[in-house]
Image (cartoon, rainbow, N blue to C red):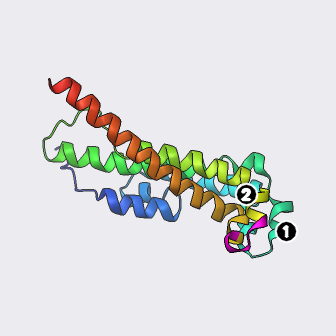
């Protein structure tokens, strides 16, 4: 007997994946991918010492972080959120009998988020940031990565929507 599909909230999956890569997959019963993402997150986090940047000591954070490992983290984080959000949307479309094709959502945002977070980690100790006391919080690699990631992510989302509208208009004529 065929099991019926259950509704999967894409926004709950997005939220849980934002908490920790893999949690959104567990929320939607995708246990294998969730376990792989959690194991990778812990492995990358331990090897990069990224959590030391959250304790408040800027000097210790700059000395302790291994950026060769830390630059993998935004990709893992962004992929986990993007994958489960889109998988939940696709599941719900199939459940409702809609064949939405291969449309993915928020790809521009998550690509921008990953690129921005990588550049934020790389540029966190620039002379511009250290010169101005009002933005001193951005000297922490995680905060700088998140701030720059969100800004570039929003720009990526706007660009994706502009491209998608143009592409859709060209094919509807």
Task: Examine the residues drawn in magenta and state their main secondary structure.
Answer: helix
* Residue 85 in picture, x, y percent from top left: 37, 51
Compared to residue 74, the image places residue 12 above or below, namely: below
Q: Residue at x 51, y 46 (%)?
A: 112
Compared to residue 17, the image places residue 158 above or below, namely: above
Q: Which residue is mark 1?
A: 60
* Residue 84 in picture, x, y percent from top left: 40, 50
- Between 28 and 120, the residue placed more toward the observer is 120
Span highlighted in magenta in the image: 131-135
Left or right: 61 as drawn, with respect to 137? right
Left or right: 26 as drawn, with respect to 48? left
Q: Which residue is mark 2?
A: 124
Compared to residue 52, the image places residue 3 above or below, namely: above
Residue 125 visible in image: no
- Residue 165, by quadrant, is top left
Asked if the magenta segment contains residue 136, the reply would be no
Left or right: 53 as drawn, with respect to 118? right
* Residue 103 in picture, x, y percent from top left: 29, 36
Residue 44 visible in image: yes
Q: Residue at x 21, y 30 (%)?
A: 169
Q: Dot 2 lies on which element?
A: loop
């Amino acid at each position: 007997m065929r099991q019926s599909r259950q509704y999967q909230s894409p926004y709950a999956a997005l939220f849980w994946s934002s908490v920790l890569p893999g949690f959104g997959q567990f929320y939607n019963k995708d246990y294998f991918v969730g376990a792989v993402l959690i194991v990778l997150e812990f492995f990358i986090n331990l090897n990069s010492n990224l959590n030391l940047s959250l304790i408040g000591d800027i000097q210790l954070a700059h000395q302790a972080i291994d950026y060769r490992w830390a630059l993998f983290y935004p990709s893992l984080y962004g992929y986990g959120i993007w994958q489960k959000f889109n998988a939940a949307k696709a599941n719900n479309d199939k459940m409702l009998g809609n064949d939405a094709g291969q449309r993915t959502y928020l790809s521009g945002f998550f690509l921008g988020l990953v690129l921005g977070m990588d550049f934020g980690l790389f540029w966190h100790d620039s002379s511009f940031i250290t010169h101005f006391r009002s933005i001193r919080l951005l000297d922490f690699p995680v905060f700088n990565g998140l701030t720059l990631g969100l800004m570039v992510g929003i720009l990526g989302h706007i660009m994706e929507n502009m491209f998608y509208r143009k592409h859709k208009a060209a094919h509807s004529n």
